[in-house]
Image (spheres, grey):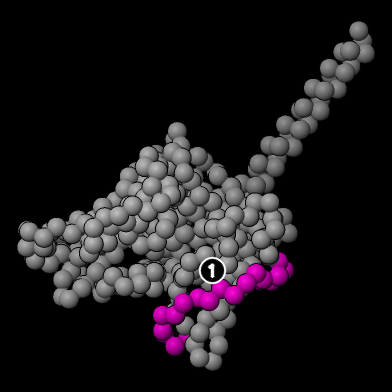
Amino acid sequence: MIRGKRVVLYRLCICAVLLIVNCQLSIVNCQKAVTLPFGDMNAWLVREIKESAVIGGNTKLLYEVAPPDTLRGNNAYTNMGGSPWANSNVLAKVAGVVKTNTSVFPEKRGDGWCARLETRYESVKVLGLINIEVIAAGSLYLGAMHEPITGTKNPQSKLQSGIPFTQKPQAVCFDYKIKAAPEENRTRSTGFSRKSTVAGRDSLAVVLYLQKRWEDKEGKVYAKRVGTMVNRYWQSTSGWVNNATYPILYGDISAHPEYKDYMRIQDEERYTVNSRGDIVPINETGWADPDEIPTHIILQFTSSHGGAYIGSPGNTMWIDNVRVVYADED
């Protein structure tokens, strides 16, 4: 009987020790999680844009993650106040016609704000008669947008993908909520042809790449992949998922148990600005050694996948408190 009590007491002591250790580890991890600049999503700038009379002449609002302000006028936007964030809200001037798209919105969350990314139809009537409808996905990313958009060809080249970054975090951490559209296939709608079906269920995604980039004498930009984290979401959540933490895998991960095809090298073409001021593709050539120090970080949240004008309207992703997590020695 006494021995039994000792065993029970011993187990209780072990549980208490484990509980204390776990609490201490949680505190340490919280201390090591560093919020990216403006990553708490509490600061938003509003742009008031008046669209051309030929398409209705309405005043539309575009939102940017940046120090709070209101900008009026049909002017191209560049990142302000030290914010590293850009998004898919854009000003377009095509053949003299001013048009906007808004697919990223600020939304109240508790005492602060979060970002809401939507896949939606963007519609416009020309002279009140010709109705053009395209699919626009919501995207929030580290980088810049090259405005104004002057055409529909190669929209990816309008996104400057990534910012300088030389650290090696263990993981990326953020709060999120998902509402996934129920359709089993995606829709393609460019506004210039009939809508069509694209096989495969839509997914929402977060992509993080650490790259080591360099430029040759001709101005071409190359990169090797130092770190990788890609996660896709196909199902709605029941509410907010707080402190979701995803490890960053370093080096060649093609044989790693968690490797997926969408983590591959050059999964899609991305662009940057070279030393001459030209917009050029980033030619990702292979995996870097895991000990390499990166030069840039790509981090993007998106409400659809598959390319421009493809998605499932209704897909919605909420994002808040974006952080990176470092090891003890960092």
- Is residue 90 among the parts visible in the rendering? yes
Location of the N terminus by quadrant is top right
Single out the residue that lies furthest toward the top. 1
Residue at label 1?
Answer: 266
Image side of residue 128 versus residue 47, left or right = left
For the residue carrying disc 1, how many other residues have a C-alpha within 10 Å: few (<14), some (14-19), or many (20+)?
A: some
Q: Which residues are magenta?
A: 275-296
Residue 157 image offset from top left, x and y in percent: 39, 73
Single out the residue that lies furthest toward the bottom. 217
Q: Amino acid at mark 1?
A: Gln
Of the pair 271 and 321, the residue shown nearer to us: 271
- Is residue 113 among the parts visible in the rendering? no
Q: In this picture, is 15 found above or below 292?
A: above
Q: In this picture, is 209 found above or below 181?
A: below
Residue 293 in magenta stretch: yes
In the structure shown, which secondary structural element does the residue marked by tag 1 occupy? Answer: loop
Residue occupying the point 61% across, 69% down: 225
Location of the C terminus by quadrant is bottom right
Identify the image quadrant of residue 7: top right
Image side of residue 86 versus residue 295, left or right = left
Residue occupying the point 53% across, 76% down: 283
Residue 69 in magenta stretch: no
Residue 121 image offset from top left, x and y in percent: 26, 52
Q: In this picture, is 160 found above or below 219?
A: above
Identify the image quadrant of residue 327: bottom right
Residue 127 image offset from top left, x and y in percent: 6, 63
Residue occupying the point 50% across, 61% down: 299
Image side of residue 275 versus residue 192, left or right = right
Residue occupying the point 45% across, 33% down: 238
Identify the image quadrant of residue 253: bottom right
Residue 275 image offset from top left, x and y in percent: 48, 85
Of the pair 135 and 293, the residue shown nearer to us: 135
